[in-house]
Amino acid sequence: MSSHSGPRAVPVAELTPLEARLEHDALAREVAAHDVRYHGEDAPIISDADYDALRRRLEEIETAFPELKRPESVVEKVGAKPSEKFAKVRHRVPMLSLANVFSDEEATEFVDRVRRFLDLPAERPLAFTAEPKIDGLSCSLRYERGRLVVAATRGDGEEGEDVTVNVRTIAEIPQVLNGPDVPDVIEVRGEIYMRKDDFAALNARQEAAGKPVFANPRNAAAGSLRQLDPAITASRPLRFFAYAWGEIVGERPADTQSGMVEAFARWGFPTNPLMRRCGSAEEMLAHYRAVEEQRAGLPYDIDGVVYKVDDLDLQRRLGFISRSPRWATAHKFPAEKATTLLLGIDIQVGRTGSLTPVARLQPVTVGGVVVTNATLHNEDEIARKDVRIGDTVTVQRAGDVIPQILGPVIEKRPADAQPYAFPTLCPACGSHAVREIDPKTGKEDVVRRCTGGLVCPAQAVERLKHFASRNAFDIEGLGDKQIEAFHRDGLVTRPQDVFTLAVRDARALKKLKDREGWGATSAANLFAAIDARRNVALHRFIFALGIRHVGETTAKLLARRFESAEALRDVAVRAAGGDAEALADLTSIEGVGPVVAEAVADFFGEAHNLEVLAELLAEVTPEPPEAVVSEGEFSGKTIVFTGALERMSRDEAKAMAERLGAKVSGSVSKKTDLVVAGPGAGSKLADAKKHGVAVIDEDEWFRRAGVGGAA
C-alpha cells in the first residue's frame, strides 16, 4: 500500500521539479490501477480513505506543478472504462462524481464557497439537503412514458454498461412509474446496494458451496449486478435508493432537490428516510454527527453524508468543475473508525497456551472491510478500558492492521452491564490458566497461559497451523480449516503426521474423499504438495517448530550459526542439562539474548519435543543456509526497501540483502545505510532525506549487487 499521503510525506512545496514528476507519474499509475480494480473489477485492494489520500496528493502536485497536468489526467476522470462484457450506454447527462471533504472546517468552507460564488449575503437563507452516502454501485434508470427502457452503470461517467436485464430482476426498482407528474423521459439515478444481513447470508451460502466469499457488501452488490447471467443477479438480494436524476424531457416535477426526491417516492422508488433539509452549516454538521452515531445500527453501509444545495435554480448557476458539481460535496467519515455493539468476548488459545480475548461484534464496515471480530489484547486491557458485553464500542482498523477496540461509548452502556471476568481455566481443556511471574523482574506476565501443554487440543491445533504456515513449511492446500478438520478426524495430530499421510493413504484417502469438495484428485494434489516440502530451508524448519520467542529472524540466526538441526539440538540439549558452555554458545549469537536462549534450551530439554524432532527428521531434510558474503559493499550495512518493487518480491529482496551480509530494516533511521526505492515510495524517502541516507532505485540495486539484468 502506498504511503504518499502519510503524515511524514514531503510537503508538495518542498518537492523539486524532478521529485514532483517522479511522484506524479507513480501516483497517476497507482490511482488509475485502483480505479480499474474498484469500478471495473469490483475488487478494490485499498480502503476508500487510502484512495482518497492518494488522489488528493495527486491533485496537490498538479496544482503546484501545472505543467504536469495533462488532458487525460486521472484527476479529471470519473470511474473506469466500461467492461467489454456488456453493451455500452452513452449517458445523455454525464454521471459525475462528488468532491470530498473530511472535516467540519472543510464542510463549512464548502458552504462559504457556495455563498461567495453566488454572491449571497450572510443573512440570505440558503438551504441544503443532507443524506447518507450509500456505499454501493451507482446506476442510472431511463424511463420513457413511465416505462423502464435502459439501466446503466456509471462507467467512466460518459459511458456505462447496459445492465437493463439484470436491473429488471431487482424488486425495489419499479418497471412502470405511476403519477400525473411523471415526465415523458426521466433518468432516475441512485445506488444499488446490499443490506448487511443479506450480505452475511450470501457469504454463508458462498462458503457452503465452496465458492469465493465477498469482502464487503459493496463488492457483493457490484459483482451481483455485473453478471452475464441475469439468473445469478436475480438470486442476489439487491436493493436501491433513488436520490438524483439525469436527462428530463417534459415538465420537471419540483424546483428543489428535496422536492425531486419526494417525487421519486411518490412514483414508487425507495428513498432514504435519513435525508434532511438544513438551513445552515451548523444544521448540516449536526445531522452529519447524528447519522455517524447511527451508522453501526443501520442495515446498510454508508461512508459519509452528502450535502447538496436544495434550490435547483442555484444548482444550475453553480454548475460544475472538472469531474464534480460545485453545488454538492460528500463529507466522508473517518474510514478507519466506526461504532458497533460488543456482542460477546471469545477466548482463543494460541500455540503457546496464551489466552487471547477476541471481541465478537455486530458486523460493521471499517476501512472498506466488514469487521465482525476485533482484538482486546489481554485481560489488563479489558479492565483498563472497562469494556463490557453489551457496550457500544469504537472500533479502529488502519491498513492491514487487525481491528482493535479503542473503548466503550459510556453514555450508551446498558444499565445491567457487568465488568468482564477473565477466565482462570482454559476453555479448550479445562486446565488452570495462570499468569507467570518473571523471576528476574518479579513482574506478572500480561498474558494468561494454559498449563495443559500437549493435552490441550487448542494448542496442538494452533501449533499445526503454525507448522504449515506461509513462513514455515508453506504447504499448499493445507490451510487452517483443513488442519482443524484433519485434527478433528485424527488424521494429523502431530507435525510428523503431515508427512505420513500418503503412507496411511487408504485411511487418509477414504476420510478425505468423504469430505465435501474432496476426491481422489484433491487428495493427490495435497500429497504432492506435502512431498514438495520434504526439502525445506533450515531456518523455516526451526521456525516451524514453534519454539517460544523464536521468530523468523531468530530462526535465521540459529540456522546460520549451527547449519543443521542436529547441531542445534545437541547444543540446546546440553544447555538444558545445565552445561554453562553450551548456554553461552547460544547467548553468544548476536541477536539471541538470555530469554531466547533459555526458551530454546527448554524446548529441546523436553523428551516429547526430541521425539517429534527425530520423527520429523526421518521425513524431512532441512537444507543448510546459503553462504553469507562476509566481505563486500553491503556486508554489515542496514538496508531499507520501500515502494512497489517491480523486479522482485519483498521477501526476495530481503533474502538477497541478507546473502550479501546486510541487515534489512522496516524503517529508516540515522542508523540506516541505504534505501532502495521503487515506485510509490512515500514517507520513507522523506525520512532518508532527513537523515542524509543514500537512496538508489531497483536497477541500481541489481547492478551493485552484481545480479546483471535478470528480472
Image: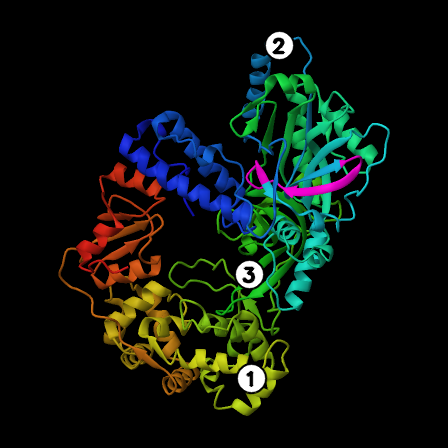
Q: Is residue 37 visible?
A: yes
Neighbours of disc 1 within 10 Å: few (<14), some (14-19), many (20+): few
Q: Which residue is mark 1?
A: 520
Lower position in the chain sequence, tag 3 or tag 1:
3
Disc 2 and disc 3 in contact, CB within 8 angstroms: no
Could you tell me the amino acid type at mark 3? Answer: Thr
Lower position in the chain sequence, tag 2 or tag 3:
2
Q: Nearer the viewer, mark 2 or mark 3?
A: 2
> Above or below — where is 573 with respect to 65?
below
Residue 26's image quarter? top left
Percent of width and height locating residue 678: 31, 48
Percent of width and height locating residue 202: 69, 58
Q: Which residues are magenta?
A: 144-159
Quadrant (top left/top right/bottom left/bottom right) for the C terminus: bottom left
Could you tell me the amino acid type at mark 2? Answer: Leu
Which element is circle 2 on?
loop
Q: 701 left or right of 317? A: left
Percent of width and height locating residue 404: 55, 50
> Above or below — where is 318 with respect to 479?
above
Q: 189 left or right of 667? A: right
The residue drawn where x is 38% and y is 86% is 614
- CA distance separating discs 2 and 3: 59 Å
- CA distance separating discs 3 and 1: 38 Å
Q: Which residue is mark 3?
A: 356
Q: Which residue is mark 2?
A: 120
Q: Nearer the viewer, mark 3 or mark 1?
A: 1
Neighbours of disc 3 within 10 Å: few (<14), some (14-19), many (20+): many
- CA distance separating discs 2 and 1: 76 Å
